[in-house]
Image: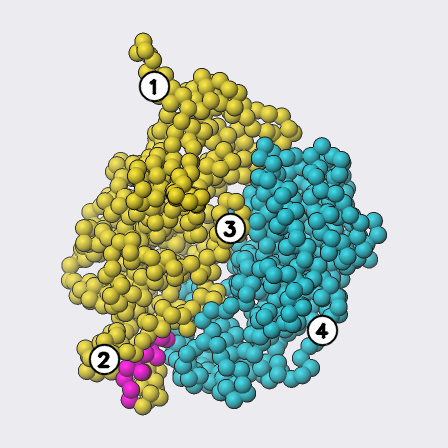
Chain colours: A cyan, B yellow
Amino acid sequence: MLPHNAESGLTRRHFLQHAAGSAVWTGPASMLAGSLLANAPDLRRRHKAAIVLWMGGGPSTMDIWDLKPGAPTGGPFKQISTSADGIAICEHMPLMAQQMHHMSIVRSMSTREADHMRGRYYLHTGYVPSPSVEHPSYGAVVAHELASQVPELDLPPFVSIGGGSVGPGFLGMAWAPFVVDSNGTLRDLDMGIDPARFGQRLEMLAAIENRFIAERRGGPAEEHAKVVGKTVKLMSSPQLDAFKVAKEPKDVQERYGNSSFGRGCLMARRLVEAGVPFVEVDLGGWDNHADIFPTLSDRKLPELDRAMSALVADLADRGILDDTAILWMGEFGRTPTINGNGGRDHWARSWSVVVGGAGFKRGVIVGETSSDGKEVVSDPYAAQDLMASVLESLGISLETTFKARNGRPMKIANGGKPIKELFS
Amino acid sequence: MLSRLLRVVAAVAGIAAGGSLLAADKHFGVPAVAFINEQVAAGWADIKLQPAPVATDGEWCRRVHLDVIGRVPTVDELEAFLADPSPNKQARLVDRLLGEDSSEEYASNWTDVWTTLLIGRSGDNDRVNRSGMRQWLRRALARNMPYDQFMHELVTATGVNKAGEPGFNGATNFLAGKLEENGLQATAKTAQIFLGLQVQCTQCHNHPFNTGRQNQFWEFNAFFRQTKALRRFGGTQEIQAMELVDEDFRGEGGNPEQAELYYELRNGLMKVAYPVFVDGTAISESGYLPGVMADGTRFGTHRRRELAGLIAASPLFPRAQVNRLWGHFLGHGFTRPVDDLGDHNPPSHPELLAGLADRFREHSFNTKELVRWIVLSQPYGLSSKASKGNATDDPASGEPPRFSRFYLRQMRAEELYQSLLTATEADAANAKGEKASRPKEQWLAQFIIAFGTDEGDDATTFNGSIPQVLMMFNGELMKTATAAGEGGFLDRTVQGEQKNAARLQRLYMAALARKPSRPEIAAATRLVEARQGDAVGALQDVWWAVLNSNEFILNH
């Protein structure tokens, strides 16, 4: 690790100033200003951010957020009432039940992608996979739109904790998710040599890098130089502290739970406080084709309940929930029927997501499914509508249009419409 | 004045075009190469693309080493190629890379490729034995097993999946972890890898974006219903190994003579399926394995063997392999993704794809021959530099690839690892077999991200993002590669050459297969000054920079 005392901070700045002289990386120059700002006491300005809690595998939302007690395949779980009037959720989510006045449930998601990889892609981008274009995911879009709010940020604007998220597509590798594990271990940060010498190496590197770019061999050559610039900025930043969950008081760590998802949620809060506009926290293991009920009640739901409720409450206590959107989702739901192995299979036609914070209306239920859970009986919503809603809650204009690499204009969130019941 | 200038421009352009024409003409007496050149050039003419000039010898030598044997050339290999005056030198190099001398490295490279394809990056668990899979692949690839036999052995494998156990057959690892839930994964992966068909979406319903139907999924699935993966326990409760066996399938209706399975339509209706191949060919409905009755009548059928036979006879089988290999060497297949050849996803060069597939079959599914055709072709030999005449040919923009220049792409993590060993002349570069792959696998593990699904999907962070650059900047592997210690690569470089200029050139040749440019020599000279004459120290800095460059990590 880099030492964090003032003296070596100066040396770092010195070498970066040096490196900034080379043509490819203008980043380090702004980083210099950034470090100074970051060290100032009043660094916490208000900025918008989003946290996605990604439930890899496709969680059974009818056993968590939209129970069907009494229905033949409703499963064994009971409902409990919550802090929000008229919202009842699963009995194995007692801590979240106390936070539901901060959140809203959309029970009318209806999509068509019931394959993991396709569903992952669709829910992350608002687009179905296409052979000709790679679309940017939530993280890349939000980071791209909000990064200018946090000019002093050295950290990558899109961090994915414990999972890979989905890539930046045509926005380019500079907006790729920075993937870390929930312990916040960042490998290979220590340059192991004198910073001045590191700066000299960077100059040599710039000579090679620039020559190759000038030969016009295509996008990847320039993308590489951009990512090198971002890496240099990151390596020498005091903001790296945001990854160190262990620096939190013990009782706070306790509150989030001793699980990787708990640590991931706590890290998400620290990153958002440090200025990162988009964080995704991954909790896998929802692909419950067999023995779903004991798996949910004994393992998955307690872990989720503790970490998610702590995150919501903590953001609210710190007064940053109003600027931070939270979105809980997986790639699809699970069949309202129970299979021969006591599990539920993939089901995209009727399922739920949970949102809260930022500009979202809280404590409401949007939409409704039939008594057996097999149909959405209100207006159905798709991935692009959900994405448009999250962007709307952050104040990102839905008129924004990107240009894909072929020059074709691409509407942000695939032209989805915000879910109206979540606003007003 | 103006007209004279135009004549000069035309003359210069003529030289460039002449270079390309010469290349198009060059097919080394191999008809398949001439066929590729013709077909690709026809595509250029259609939309008036001007192909890039041919790559330099150094660039070509570097890319063919990377793509065929998974590493950059050594300085000796590179210099021998550059010095070879023969007009046939490309063919001679390809012969060497596909020949006996390189067979170990060839097998090792393609074992990496196939392991990821067959069992993913992270597949090593109770059910799948990664090293057993690798051992089988290495042997099959080293002897260039015909591709139909290769498929047949994987699709029909029986035996134990772990080396050292009685009845070991490493090929079983392909299916050993894919038989749960009645073999859903076995169905999806077999269709995807060997036929280029994406059927996983049709498991639950007819798919709107795919021509496959739900019944086809389950009829294909029916071929795997005689197959069971049995757990072999050791002395403890832990699973020691898995064994794949075939046994009679009694059918979900309880009649082995007509062994059926049931699947559910979206509306809840149950339907019946028997083994039927994707082209509509049905086999016996019997679930019995083959046997002979007392009166001599034969009965029963071996469903997986029937399936392997049908796959081998299918026109999709060679096409899927051609498309995958073309994508491997040219950076883009004829379809995107390469393993989706369904009717809804038309290829960029249908005649070329079909023609190469036919030739591949005619040559007894000889994969090395197919490799030879592709790497000796004109499009493979073009420069990666964009010019006015071909700047629009950019598949990254969503246009179908036209192969009028070589598309940049990043080395795979395995290629980087092997290239670093080679470039630094590390002893480990000479280590052979499975032993050598263990430290590599450990190193690779840092980049793997699992997606938390039952299907074992995964991805890699070795994708050009920050963690990769950090690893290249400061990682252990890099520290070893740039170590200044006595007897190390840099120390030996200093001992071997008297002048700094020659030392610098050696580093450039080893990593980039070219000589340093004037500005680069100037930059290196500044480093020597900064290190106050410490030659090893300065080379250390240069070496770090060279290995960290876009030019090194991007196959160009």
Can you identify the residue that label 1 sits on? B291
Tell if the residue under mark 1 belongs to the same chain as the one under mark 2. Answer: yes
* Amino acid at pointer 3: Ser
Q: Amino acid at mark 2?
A: Val
- Left or right: B342, with A47 as reference point: left
| Chain letter belonging to callout 2 | B
Who's the residue at 18% across and 50% down the image?
A: B100
**Residue highlighted by disc 3:** A132
Q: Secondary structure at mark 4?
A: loop
Q: Quadrant of the C terminus of chain B?
A: bottom left
Q: Nearer the viewer, residue A309 or A137?
A: A309
Q: In the orientation shown, which residue stands out farthest toward the left?
A: B85
Relative to A108, is B133 on the left or the right? left
The residue located at (43%, 33%) in the rendering is: B228
Q: Which mark is residue A46?
A: 4
Viewer-nearest of discs 1 and 4: 1
The chain holding disc 1 is: B
Mark nearest the camera among 2 and 3 is 2
**The residue under label 1 is which amino acid type?**
Gly
Which chain's residue wears label 4?
A
